[in-house]
Each structure stands twice: as C-alpha cells, then as structure tokens.
Amino acid sequence: PERRPSTPDPRWIDRALGEAEVREAALASAHLLRCSLEELDLRGSELSGTTFEECSAVGSRFDHATADGVTVTGGSWTGTRWEGADLCDARFDAADLTNAVFDKALLTGAMFTGSRLSGASLRDTRGMGFTLSGGTAFAVDLTGAGLCGNAFAGARLTDAVLRGTDLRGATFDGCDLLGAEIEGADLLGADLRAAALPEDLPLTALGGAVLTPGQLSRLAAAQWGIVVAEV
C-alpha cells in the first residue's frame, strides 16, 4: 500500500540531535526534517517507520539496527554503515549514500531510487531482493546481492562490481556498464539491449543475457575478431 506522507513535529525540525534524541524520535516513528545526526553510534537501535527528510548523518553507524519501513529522502548519508541492519521495505530517495556500507543487510522490498551510491558496498545482502533505479552507482559493490527482476532504469553502473549478483530478468535501460565486473553474475533473461556495453565486457560472462544483434556483433568483433555479416 502507498504510504501517506507524515508531518514533521516541531521538536524534530532543524535540530542537532544526539543518540538518545534520535532513539526517542524513532520510538514515536517521528518525521525528522533537516536535522543533523552526524557521527552517531546507533548500532542495534530501533528505528522502524522513522522518516528522515533532508537530514545529515555523515559517518553515523546503524549496524544491526531494526529499521524496517524507514524513509530517507534527500540529505547526506555519506559513509554511514548499515551492516546486518533490518531494512525491509526501507526507502532511500535522492539520498547521498556515497561510500555507505550495507553488507549483509536484510533488504527485502527496500528501494533505492535516484540516490547516489558511488563507492557504496551492498555485498551479500539478504532477503527476497531490493530495487535500485536511477541515480549514480559508480564503483558500487553488489557482489552476491539479490536483484532478480530489477529495473535499473538509467542507473550509472560504471566500474560496478556485479560478481555473483543475481540479475535474472533484470533490465538495464539507459545504464552505463563501462568497466563493470560481471563475472559469475546470473544474467538469465537479463535485458541489456538498451544498455551501454563496453567492447571489453566479456562475452563469456553474458550467458543467458538478451542482446541486440548489433551489440553481439560489436563485442564479437572487438574480442574475438569475428565479423558477423548479414546474408
């Protein structure tokens, strides 16, 4: 069901918050607007249903937090750590998550839309899969992540690490895969027809993927010297 927008409480607008205050706000599933919660240790905290709008949490730790249904809209969350956190149905929209770490987080139903994930790590995430669309994911590490059926829809995946990633049935419309590492990824039914594929993207790693004849011809010519000619 579609979420109804929450209304910020005056207590949680334009505030510099400490760890106890963030936990207090989270207990009420509060809506925090333009608050600063930088360099805090919130490991293991209960944050379910909390909304963070245009907040700054640079360098804070949320490892093993229970944060299902949390909403993060905009703001700077660079270098935050969410290792092992429960982020089921979480929403990260247009947030700066540069160098954030989500390794082994539970991400069933989570959505990252239009966010900056450059240098972020989402290795071996758990659950039934999550959504990553739009935004910039330069050098993101998605090793072993579950993205079956994901619509990447214009995400910049330059130098992304997709080793062992479940990409079955995923679509890559408008995506840039220059320098991406895809060895061992499951690409069965993955649609790469509208993606920008570098000539050195190994054909041997593309088993099961859907390509255009033009893409296949260009890759085969560049890597194996094979010329595919029309009859």
Image (spheres, rainbow, N blue to C red):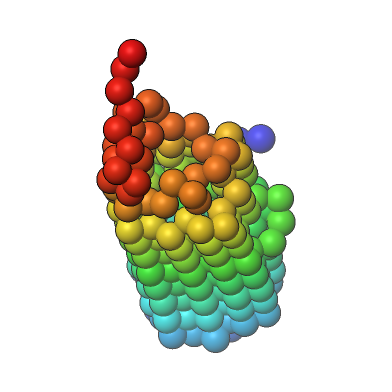
Image height of 193 relative to 161, above or below = above
Q: Is residue 138 visible?
A: yes
Tell me if 70 is positioned left or right of 222 in this view.
right
Q: Is residue 137 visible?
A: no
Q: Residue at x 38, y 34 (%)?
A: 216
Quadrant of the image occupied by residue 165: bottom right
Q: Which x, y percent locates residue 180?
A: 38, 57
Q: Residue at x 57, y 57 (%)?
A: 184
Q: Residue at x 43, y 32 (%)?
A: 211
Quadrant of the image occupied by residue 213: top left
Tell me if 3 is positioned left or right of 200 in this view.
right
Most foreground residue, 220 or 173? 220
Q: Residue at x 43, y 36 (%)?
A: 192
Image height of 133 relative to 25, above or below = above
Tell me if 165 is positioned left or right of 195 in this view.
right
Quadrant of the image occupied by residue 197: top left
Quadrant for the C terminus in the image: top left
Quadrant for the N terminus in the image: top right
Q: Which x, y percent locates residue 156?
A: 33, 50
Image height of 164 relative to 168, above or below = below
Most foreground residue, 67 or 214? 214
Q: Residue furthest right?
A: 127
Most foreground residue, 56 or 163? 163
Most foreground residue, 75 or 169? 169
Q: Residue furthest top?
A: 231
Q: Which x, y percent locates residue 89?
A: 64, 51
